[in-house]
């Protein structure tokens, strides 16, 4: 019978790769914890309506990319394509937002039916932070500082560039869209199919088209900057001053508009050129109208989300996973001879009690010394500890051997009662 395969664009994360993920998760959680953010968890399935109302009906995500279906009750549900909508729904439903300030984070899988390629998948993972109840721009600067600290901790700072833009309010963008659409209609011959469609439905998205021809057609187009309101402009200037004083470098990108409709004022993206076409590693901005649009009381809000797969790709290709994080097992315990099960279990527990931070695997399934040693090497452990009985039925020898599993093959036989201090010398 033919074997079944995973769904295209949905990846299995195998044990060796999980180590990179765990390293990243640990560092992310340390950074958000230090900044006082608390975890929120919400379902991967929500009513489709939630995403339509928040992300926007005329966006690629809602029009083309959601995994939506009617469940057995006839309710139309979707796998979450991003975390902000669900986070707002959950926080508001449980009364965390009204008249309060919240700093929240989440992590988990998101689903978009995009064309899979390196760095772009149909199930992918995000780390997100969302802050509620603060007008900014101090909270916007804090959020960007938090992301910059994460890059620093991961030693990726020099490979990431912060791009920012001011996109004003929804009304500003409506007026701008009309002007941009009129401009594009005069150059329709120079547009590709995608841009022609967007010109009518969501002209702002033409701005971040990757087609060179479309970018040429955009030369001399009306600038969003001249349509944005004064409050938004002031906020943006203050944010830039705060970023400057925090030593966070940025580049203004007037073409940065983001693919989700809920933003206002400042938006941002951290990009890299180490990943090829999918260079956006983190994106976000303010979204002060979203809570109200979803039926809550008006609540100021800002946040971002990081693409975990993209960050893992960066860490691995730039060789930034520390050696300790790549070491799942430290000690492999061999038991050579009959009926050593009990002693081997006891020794393993004794070692684990003394070295709780180490990974200690006890060989199971018997076998000769050489075949056990081979497994010890394959496990990636640093040290082997060998428990040996000379002849069947004889008392357990009072000695164990400690052996380095590297080219030195250095080893020492020690009294079993001395194993703990001796191991410390080898570690
Ligand atoms: P987004 O820009 O759509 O924003 O996604 C954030 C990040 O998720 C992207 O920068 C990228 O790294 C990653 N990502 C997106 N799609 C894929 C994919 N198909 N495969 C792999 N990685 C992907 C949001 O989702 C907003 N909710 C961010 C936000 C939070 N804004 C305010 N708060």
Image: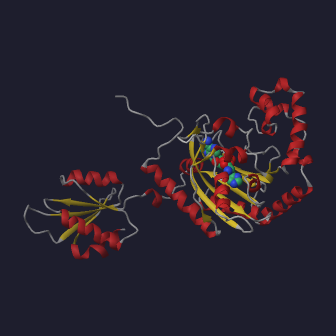
Q: Quadrant of residue 276?
A: top right
Residue appearing at x 47%, y 59% in the figure: 325
**View extreme (front): residue:** 73
Asked whether, in this view, residue 173 is left or right of residue 102, the answer is right
Nearest the eye: 74 or 416? 74
Q: Quadrant of the N terminus?
A: top left
Residue 288, position as x, y percentages in the image: 78, 57
**How far across and how far down the image is residue 419, in percent?**
27, 73
Q: Is residue 365 above or below residue 244?
A: above
Looking at the rendering, in which quadrant would you find the C terminus?
A: bottom left
Residue 312 is left or right of residue 157, and the answer is left
115 and 49: which is toward the camera: 49
Residue at point 73% right, 40% down? 57
As drawn, which residue projects farthest toward the top? Answer: 189
Instruction: Answer with left or right where residue 328 lies relative to residue 204.
Output: left
* Residue 196 position within the rendered picture, expressed as x and y whole percent measured from the top left: 79, 28
* In-image side of 213 versus 394 (left or right): right
């Amino acid at each position: 019978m033919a074997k079944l395969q995973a769904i295209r664009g949905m990846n299995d994360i195998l044990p060796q790769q999980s180590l990179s993920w765990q390293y990243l998760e640990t560092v992310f959680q340390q950074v958000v914890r230090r900044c006082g953010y608390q975890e929120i968890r919400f379902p991967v399935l929500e009513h489709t309506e939630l995403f339509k109302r928040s992300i926007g009906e005329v966006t690629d995500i809602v029009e083309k990319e959601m995994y939506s279906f009617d469940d057995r009750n006839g309710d139309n549900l979707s796998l979450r394509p991003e975390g902000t909508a669900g986070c707002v729904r959950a926080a508001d439903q449980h009364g965390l937002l009204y008249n309060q300030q919240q700093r929240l984070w989440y992590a988990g899988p998101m689903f978009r039916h995009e064309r899979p390629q390196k760095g772009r998948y149909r199930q992918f993972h995000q780390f997100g932070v969302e802050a509620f109840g603060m007008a900014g721009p101090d909270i916007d600067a804090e959020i960007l500082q938090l992301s910059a600290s994460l890059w620093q901790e991961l030693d990726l700072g020099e490979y990431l560039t912060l791009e920012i833009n001011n996109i004003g309010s929804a009304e500003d963008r409506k007026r701008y869209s009309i002007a941009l659409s009129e401009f594009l209609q005069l150059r329709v011959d120079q547009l590709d199919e995608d841009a022609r469609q967007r010109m009518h439905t969501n002209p702002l998205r033409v701005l971040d088209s990757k087609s060179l021809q479309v970018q040429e057609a955009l030369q001399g187009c009306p600038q969003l900057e001249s349509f944005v309101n004064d409050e938004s402009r002031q906020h943006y200037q203050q944010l830039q001053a705060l970023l400057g004083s925090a030593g966070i470098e940025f580049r203004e990108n007037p073409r940065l508009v983001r693919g989700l409709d809920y933003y206002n004022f400042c938006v941002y993206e951290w990009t890299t050129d180490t990943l090829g076409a999918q260079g956006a590693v983190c994106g976000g901005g303010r979204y002060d109208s979203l809570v109200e649009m979803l039926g809550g009381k008006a609540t100021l809000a800002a946040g971002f989300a990081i693409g975990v797969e993209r960050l893992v790709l960066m860490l691995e290709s730039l060789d930034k996973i520390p050696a300790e994080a790549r070491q799942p097992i430290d000690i492999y315990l061999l038991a050579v001879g009959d009926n050593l099960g009990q002693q081997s279990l006891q020794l393993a527990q004794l070692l684990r009690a003394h070295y709780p931070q180490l990974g200690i695997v006890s060989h199971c399934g018997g076998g000769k010394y050489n075949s056990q040693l081979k497994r010890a090497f394959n496990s990636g452990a640093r040290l082997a500890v060998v428990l040996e009985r000379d002849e069947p039925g004889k008392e357990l020898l009072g000695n164990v051997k400690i052996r380095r599993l590297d080219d030195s093959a250095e080893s020492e036989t020690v009294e079993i009662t001395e194993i703990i201090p001796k191991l410390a010398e080898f570690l």
